Amino acid sequence: MAGEASAEAARKSSQADASVSAPEEPDFPVPGDDKAAAFFDLDNTVMQGAALFHFGRGLYKRKFFETRDLARFAWQQAWFRLAGVEDPEHMQEARDSALSIVKGHRVAELQSIGEEIYDEYMAERIWPGTRALAQAHLDAGQRVWLVTAAPVEIATVIARRLGLTGALGTVAESVNGIYTGKLVGEPLHGPAKAEAVRALAHAERLDLDRCAAYSDSHNDIPMLELVGHPYAINPDTKLRKHARARDWRLRDYRTGRKAAKVGIPAAAGVGAVAGGTAAAIAISRRRR
């Protein structure tokens, strides 16, 4: 009896200690909150690597450009995976190359190819942890958008395959269903994402303070700061530091470590129909 009593007292004591050191958080996302939504960056947040590079691999396979160009693409992708952050020069080069590659092709053709490329190169690179976060919002009855500088055609394919509400992405100009090689507006990148999110929130009558945004990159801090629940996912060094300073939640799925939490979140974003339209991005240069 004395032993059982001692064990029971120890068990209750450990439970009490745990409740003191780890107080329960309120449920999030909040089920049934139709004024809330979630907005996810794509590259290195939802998917390992950059969507435009995977897209480029698929275009190379379909002979949209030459072998020598693939070497440049492979180097850029290796750099991206090691650094885990976007390089403006790499992104600009990829964007310009993509525009020259898709010029003269039909939008419907690229959309169809995008479906194939998702199955070939992207499906297996979706981070399960981030996928679960998005699903939690969906299960709570909330809308979920991708917000990315990747081509809107590719972003839409990924969003649909993941069962998300939709996607905001960079838009390439087309006339009569054929790409012109120009952009519509600017790339959906950095501050443009924040503007897009703000515009969509207004159009959808969302409360940004009740929304969530997720990204790996310090370039997306403007978007993250719009929302009430910002998350740093697989963060680069600058974003990690920024998140810690502001007690944002942090998740890192790259190493298999248990996700670390950095305090309580801060503001929530949305994606925009109008904010930052721009480039259809693929990869390497076409034969000159």
Image (cartoon, rainbow, N blue to C red):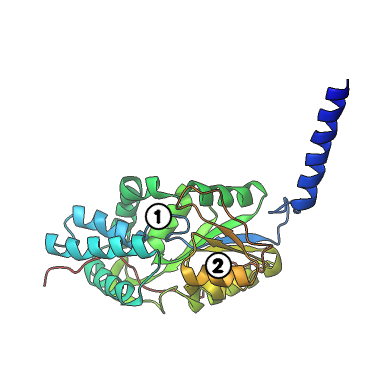
Q: Position of residue 113 (x, y in %)?
A: 29, 53
Quadrant of the drawing holding the C terminus: bottom left
Residue type, numbered disc 1: Gln
- Residue located at (51% from left, 49% from top): 257
> What residue sits right under mark 2 in the picture?
271
In front here: 60 or 237?
237
Left or right: residue 63 compared with residue 192: left
Q: How far is disc 2 from disc 1 in space, using C-alphas?
A: 21 Å
Rendered residue at 27%/65% (across/down) = 76
Q: Which mark is residue 178?
A: none
Q: Foreground residue, 286 or 19? A: 19
Question: Which element carries disc 2, helix, strand or loop?
Answer: loop
Image side of residue 46 versus residue 37, left or right: left
Q: Earlier in the sequence, mark 2 or mark 1?
A: 1
Question: Where does label 1 land, which residue?
Answer: 48
Picture coordinates of residue 74 (x, y %)? Answer: 23, 60
The picture places residue 270, in percent across and down from the top left corner, at 59, 67
Please name the amino acid that badge 2 sits on: Gly
Q: Secondary structure at mark 1?
A: loop
